[in-house]
Amino acid sequence: MKVELVDDAGEFRRLAGEYLSRDPLRHTVIATAIENFASGLSDGRVVFAAVRADGVVIGAGMQAGPHSIYLSDVPDPIVGELAERFAEHVPDAPGVEAAPGIGLVFAERWSALRGGKFRMDFASRLYRLGALRVPEVPGRLRGALDADIDICEQWLDGMRNEVGVGLDRAAIRVRIALGRLWLWERDGRPVSLAAHQARAYGWSRIGPVYTPPEERRNGYAGALTAHLSQWLRDKGSRVCLFTDLGNPTSNKIYQAIGYEPVHNFVHYVFE
């Protein structure tokens, strides 16, 4: 086995596309990143990694901008070498996200190489949409407009303060222009927000989803996600999303509307 690094999304798609397409749900993060960088929606530094055996890609990983390294289900014997190659090329990577066993081995090797420590930050779960159940909640789904940029920015700043994930104003503007940012509106007033990623290999991933504190416990996030899921499915997509396992409320909401658990992941922060 050997590790090959690529810094061009189009080149990596040609190299690893067949591998990614065999399990596009498991590879939704990497597949979406390829689409975003290839289309120009994302820019800046990106490093993709392909694990090859006898010329065939059997594993993948990536690191983009300020984000953590992300790994697919790579073979155990190559995890240490992946850590070494990423440490050479992106020594400032803040962490790693992967399946639990892979993530731990990678973090241990990284820490040995870099002389630091690591800690578990959060655990997440990937869900796929099964039989959709749309709740009856007052309001309606609508696409966000330029006039909604201020409220979307306010809410996503709030989300960043709460959970460390959000979108800046420029990213909000682009997603509105692309039709990938949505609101749940009640009595003419936005009360919840959701975005979705570009479709990749037949799958569309919803996220982020955010309801401001003053609008919670009204069912808006569940209704918004359910209606957006139906819209995406009607457009021909299979639909998935991630949850934070530390937030039992969101996991309960998504399972109630028909999402089924598929994979668990861990995120380690390097210190």
Image (tube, helix red, strand yellow):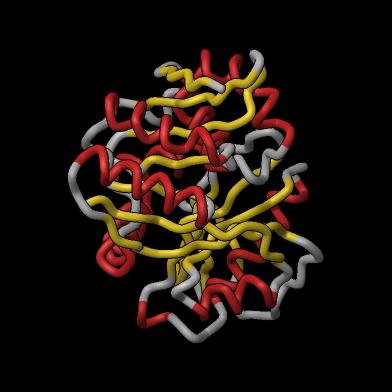
The vertical placement of 107 against 69, above or below, is below
Residue occupying the point 54% across, 72% down: 221
Q: How many marks?
A: 0
Can the viewer see residue 189? Answer: no
The vertical placement of 171 against 117, above or below, is above
Residue 56 position by quadrant: top right
Q: In this image, 92 relative to 249: left or right?
A: left
Q: In this image, 14 relative to 156: left or right?
A: right
Which is nearer the eye, 103 or 245? 103
Residue occupying the point 43% across, 71% down: 211
Which is nearer the eye, 228 or 58? 58
Residue occupying the point 70% across, 23% down: 18
* Percent position of residue 66, x then y: 27, 40
Could you tell me which quadrant the N terminus lies in?
Answer: top right
Residue occupying the point 45% across, 68% down: 190
Which is nearer the eye, 113 or 217? 113
* Percent position of residue 157, x then y: 27, 60
Residue farthest bottom in this picture? 217
Can the viewer see residue 169? Answer: yes
